Image: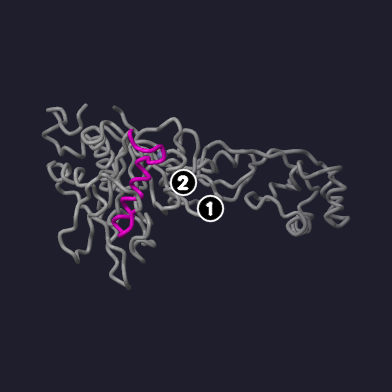
Amino acid sequence: MDVLSPPAAKKAKSVHCHTLDDLFGIKALLSDEYKKEIRLIKVHSCELESKQQLQAVIQELAQKLPHFQHLKRVHDRNVLICPTADIKDTLEQHLKQHQISDHVLKALCRNVNVVEVPANSAKLRVQYDQMVKYWPCKFHPDKYAESLQNGSNFTSSQRLYHKRMAQLLRHLSRDLNQGQPVAICVDPRQPSIVAIAGSSNSEGSHQHCVMWLVDHVARSQQGGAWQSQVDFVQDEQQHAAKTLRGLPQNYYDYLQSHEHCKDLQYGAELPRRGSEKQPEDELGTSVDNLSKYGPYLCTGYDIYLLREPCLMCAMALVHSRVKRIFFLEQSKNGALASSFQLHGVKELNHHYEVFQFTTTS
Ligand SMILES: [Zn+2]
């Protein structure tokens, strides 16, 4: 279906709201620690003879075998001692090695059995609900993570904007780039389109459209290293607050000539020299380094991609300090959903959020 020309029956309604809601949903791609499946480990537990023993036992275990911070150590008179995997010889020897006093050791070595308990803390309520079936857990709800999980993180106007960008990707790819990938960078504060890039088959193997986009964003900050055949928009006023330098002329002309794009904003804030005023934050992103310090690489920016990026491009977006990535189509060597989840790698020094548009077409 051509999303630029909705079916006659829908034309009477507010075109963008209804056709876009029919076409796109937005799903947060959370890293594995937010997945529903929980991991269990085997643990030695014992049943104390009386509740009077509890205080002494708990105190000593907390000091000498400090395991299970995410679990309640005691359940009725049952106490978690240590993971079975920690024990080389016998439980008694293990406790002696850890200088457990004789009277506590005696209490712990009666009625010993092995139980399965959750290996990690719950990130989401849905995980917590699963975990407490095995053993009482501690849980600190994370409202933002819950909203990502249930899709309530965006307001309706934010959702609409994201979906419009998804629609734009399709049109730009189809009408200007022979169906090849297209990428858009947006400053979410206004929101305003900072840069656009397309790739084509004839380019070098490492010149994927994300790499071009990063370079075009750099152009908006008076940088940019790649030689391009593309003509870019020239800023008319020398001292304007925003620059259009990251926008290729043909993409900009196309957008300007389409009625449904007339209300979109374009341009990037220029790199700041001193302390200047902080713009409003329309897309609901909290005040961050972009608002505080002005543009630097892609700090605070959102990236919209037709295709899920490869590992090289996904890594380039980590280095560029991107805030969020939205993509439409999964790709075979994609590094965010299909073959890998780069944003779930804890060791990286920057993490972006990832969203996928779901489509019914
Ligand atoms: Zn790539």
Q: Tell me, yes or no, if residue 22 can be seen here.
A: no
Q: Tell me, yes or no, if residue 319 can be seen here.
A: yes
Q: Nearer the viewer, residue 59 or 179?
A: 179
- Residue 44: give x, y in percent of width and height: 76, 42
Name the N-terminal-most of marks 2 and 1: 1
Q: Which residues are magenta?
A: 202-224
What is the residue that sits farthest to the bottom in this orientation?
274
- Residue 94: give x, y in percent of width and height: 84, 48
Q: Residues within 10 Å of mark 2 (few under 14, many from 20)?
A: some
Q: Secondary structure at mark 2?
A: helix
**Quadrant of the snapshot with the N terminus:** top left
- Label 2 – label 1 distance at C-alpha: 31 Å
Q: Nearer the viewer, residue 208 or 75?
A: 208
Above or below for 92 versus 290: above
Amino acid under disc 1: His
Q: Residues within 10 Å of mark 1 (few under 14, many from 20)?
A: few
Residue visible at 39% across and 52% down in the picture = 323
Q: Nearer the viewer, residue 359 or 217?
A: 217
**Quadrant of the snapshot with the C terminus:** top left
Q: Secondary structure at mark 1?
A: loop
Q: In this rendering, which labeled residue sits more in front, label 2 or label 1?
A: 2
- Residue 56: give x, y in percent of width and height: 78, 58
Amino acid under disc 2: Met
147 magenta-colored: no
Above or below for 239 versus 113: below
- Residue 271: give x, y in percent of width and height: 31, 64
Ligand 1 under 8 Å from disc 1 Cβ: no
Above or below for 94 versus 243: above
Circle 1 is placed at which residue position? 140
